């Protein structure tokens, strides 16, 4: 799967970007197929030459000659690599690292996307600074050390950082959204308790299989920190799950619940362990009209679902994700 590095695009172009990538990939495959038919003989000769070169390189590297079987295996590997290239597939090994200062801008870009149209209402630079200050908690996903992160996970203690501007902004924002649904009292009780804001962000085409190991590491890190006397023994974990919701011109008059889907595959399973949840729309919904124009009478607009996971359900949640998102 091809990956893109973090950039300035937010989720406004997520669907369009994915469609463009698929379209480009299809055209590339058709073009390669046509070229391979025109140059079939030349390609076969190049493949045989490549197989011979591979065998020579292995012999040189190991200091011994290879027999025909190993040469055939090298040729097979070359064929697999060629096929993967034609299909637009790139095999990449990811590694996990502690959050580092050089990750600041990439992490902020991902948070801007996470908070969508309302990102301007929060001091997201301050949130990244909190995450980096507690770099023993949480992790980033990279191809190599020092490179840009493709995703990250951490948890922020809402009570311990209650005087931070960004935490105050988030509390006010969420409580206002909950008040509009007559559930503000329950949310306030949760936020007044020992609650951690669980942040799980990654670039659009990053596979969800990285989530389970990151969550397992986070649980181990918070446990070690708690044993060392640090306040990471949370009663609740709060997740702001990104969603896409069906919209139409008659959205305010419909009698049935609009269709909705999670942007992150893992959030569907996280919801199973939630003791409290509610949906909310962005205060600055600038893209609903554009969504309808793109999808005729109906379209998709980004929204969020607040999920609260009690401490007792955290370990079972990790086990569940390890089962359903196994590599």
Image: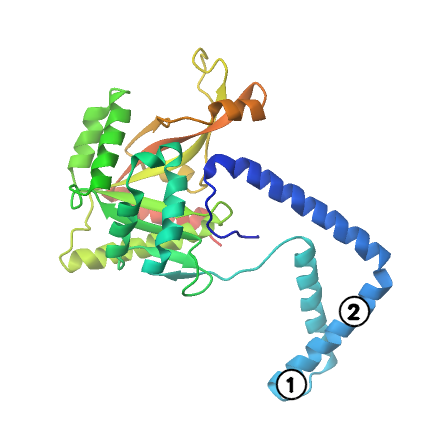
Seen in the picture, residue 101 relative to 122 is either above or below; the reply is below
Q: Which mark is residue 213?
A: none
At numbered mark 2, what does the secondary structure look like: helix, strand or loop?
helix
Residue sitting at x 59%, y 57%: 90
At numbered mark 1, what does the secondary structure look like: helix, strand or loop?
helix
CB contact under 8 Å: marks 1 and 2: no
Q: Which mark is residue 46?
A: 2
Res 161 → quadrant: top left
Determine whether, in the image, residue 37 is placed left or right of residue 121: right
Q: Earlier in the sequence, mark 1 or mark 2?
A: 2
Residue 171 on image: x %, y %: 22, 34
Badge 1 local density, few (<14 within 10 Å), some, or many (20+)? few
Q: Nearer the viewer, residue 220 or 143?
A: 143
Badge 2 local density, few (<14 within 10 Å), some, or many (20+)? few
Residue 262 can be seen in this image: yes
Determine whether, in the image, residue 135 is placed left or right of residue 107: left
Residue 70 can be seen in this image: no
Q: Nearer the viewer, residue 233 or 191?
A: 191
Residue sitting at x 50%, y 27%: 300
Residue sitting at x 30%, y 46%: 125
The CA span between labels 1 and 2 is 21 Å
Residue sitting at x 36%, y 59%: 102
Residue 40 on image: x %, y %: 84, 60
Name the image colouring. Answer: rainbow
Q: Going by the picture, which residue comes out furthest to the bottom?
A: 63
Res 54 → quadrant: bottom right
Seen in the picture, residue 262 relative to 128 is either above or below; the reply is above
Residue 252 on image: x %, y %: 43, 13
Determine whether, in the image, residue 55 is placed left or right of residue 280: right
Residue 112 on image: x %, y %: 38, 41
Q: Which mark is residue 60?
A: 1
């Amino acid at each position: 799967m091809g990956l893109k590095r973090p950039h300035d695009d937010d989720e406004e172009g997520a669907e369009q970007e994915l469609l463009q990538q698929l379209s480009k990939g299809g055209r590339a495959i058709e073009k390669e197929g046509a070229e391979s038919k025109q140059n079939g003989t030349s390609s076969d000769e190049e493949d045989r030459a490549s197989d011979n070169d591979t065998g020579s390189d292995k012999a040189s590297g190991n200091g011994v000659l290879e027999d025909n079987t190993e040469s055939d295996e090298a040729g097979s590997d070359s064929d697999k690599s060629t096929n993967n290239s034609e299909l637009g597939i790139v095999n990449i090994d990811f590694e996990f690292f502690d959050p580092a200062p050089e990750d600041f801008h990439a992490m902020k870009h991902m948070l801007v996307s996470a908070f969508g149209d309302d990102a301007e209402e929060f001091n997201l630079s301050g949130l990244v600074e909190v995450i980096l200050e507690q770099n023993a908690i949480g992790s980033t996903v990279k191809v190599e050390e020092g490179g840009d992160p493709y995703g990250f996970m951490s948890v922020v203690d809402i009570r311990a950082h209650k005087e931070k501007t960004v935490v105050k902004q988030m509390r006010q924002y969420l409580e206002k959204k909950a008040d509009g649904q007559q559930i503000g009292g329950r949310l306030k009780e949760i936020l007044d308790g020992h609650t951690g804001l669980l942040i799980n962000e990654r670039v659009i085409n990053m596979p969800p299989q990285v989530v389970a190991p990151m969550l397992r590491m986070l649980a181990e890190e918070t446990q070690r920190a708690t044993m060392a006397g640090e306040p990471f023994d949370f009663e609740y974990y709060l997740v702001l799950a990104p969603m896409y919701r069906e919209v139409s011109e008659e959205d305010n008059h419909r009698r049935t619940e609009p269709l909705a889907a999670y942007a992150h595959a893992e959030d569907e399973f996280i919801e199973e362990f939630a003791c409290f949840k509610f949906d909310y729309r962005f205060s600055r919904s600038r893209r609903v009209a554009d969504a309808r124009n793109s999808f005729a009478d109906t379209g998709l607009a980004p929204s969020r679902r607040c999920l609260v996971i009690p401490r007792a359900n955290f370990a079972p949640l990790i086990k569940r994700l390890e089962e359903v998102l196994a590599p």
